[in-house]
Amino acid sequence: MAEQRWEQRDARGAPGDARDAAATRGGAVPDEEARAWEELVATARRTVSEGLVVGTSGNVSVRVGDMVLVTPSGVPYDQLTPDDVTAVDLDGRQVRGTLVPTSELPMHLAVYRTTDAHAVVHTHAVHATAVSTLVPELPVIHYMAGALGGPVRVAPYATYGTDELAENMLRALSGRSGCLLQNHGTVTHGTSLAQAYDRTAQLEWMCRLWLTASAVPGMTPSLLTREQLKEAGERLRGYGQRG
């Protein structure tokens, strides 16, 4: 969705107000939160540089204890500073900063309340969004769907920022770590920002792959069976370096 305009920054006061607000609520921003915020901003900027979002669309969050750090609404990511820390508790009450949190906050909080996720990435990736308008589930064109828990579902359309959208998303995410949002974009979650982002990138790549293969005149892409995908998913769980 298109976030609120950046003009709201003018109302937040002088630089450093976010840290002052944090101090008012219980002291300076701890190092762990500062590091998490730095990584969150870097991830948000990456969604732009790698073409997964345009402008201030999409949003990113990371959980630190019982608090969720989240990108603010309508703020260009390249203008975010350490003083712009924006965070809420799991009930959505703002506990850090003065910038308004993303309007997609209900979606992020729904993931944290129902899973063990520590990070959520939401984008408007063009190929994934295109696929979301065509099918109720991404055809299983590649085994990397196993890394997301199985065939990627499409959550029915609902207005951005609503509880209805969050509920639709949760149903599509059942047993999965990623889904498509009809006529909207993608949502993925993971144990870290790096994992959540990687899942988003993989999902966009699979959508691009299916669209490319489907566009060949007179040809129909071969798809994996459920058994093949299950076997790949089991192997992927042990993929990579231990530790």
Image (cartoon, rainbow, N blue to C red):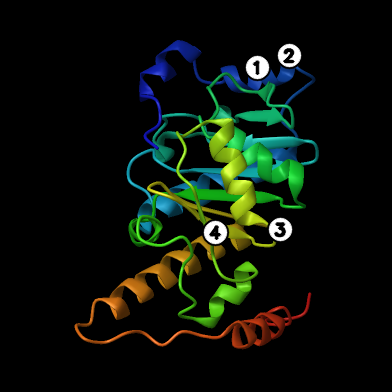
Q: Secondary structure at mark 1?
A: helix
How many residues crowd around disc 4 within 10 Å: few (fewer than 14), some, or many (20 or more)?
many
- Circles 4 and 2 in contact, beta carbons < 8 Å: no
| Mark 1–mark 3 distance (CA, rounded to whole Å) | 30 Å
Q: Which residue is mark 2?
A: 24
Q: Callout 1, which amino acid?
A: Asp
Amino acid under disc 2: Thr
Let me know if residue 105 appears in the view: no
Q: Taking the image as drawn, is residue 219 in sight?
A: yes
Residue 170: x and y in percent read 64, 48
Q: Position of residue 120 (x, y in %)?
A: 60, 49
Give percent across and percent down for residue 153.
Answer: 53, 61
* For the residues bearing labels 3 and 4, Cβ distance under 8 angstroms: no
Give the mark, 1 or 3, whose residue is nearer the N terminus: 1
The answer to whether 50 appears left or right of 188 in the picture is left
Mark 1 → mark 4, Cα distance in angstroms: 31 Å
Q: Count the numbered circles shown.
A: 4
Res 108 → quadrant:
top right
Q: Is residue 70 left or right of residue 183?
A: right
Q: Secondary structure at mark 2?
A: helix
Label 4 sits on a secondary structure element that is: helix
| Residue found 65% across the figure and 17% down from its top | 20
User: Which residue is the site of mark 1?
Assistant: 20
Q: Which residue is mark 3?
A: 191
Q: Secondary structure at mark 3?
A: loop
Q: Closer to us: mark 4 or mark 2?
A: 4
Could you say which is closer to the camera, residue 182 or residue 192?
182
Residue sitting at 51 percent across and 34 percent down? 81
Q: Which residue is mark 4?
A: 197
Amino acid type, label 3? Thr
Say which label, 1 or 4, has the lower sequence index.
Answer: 1
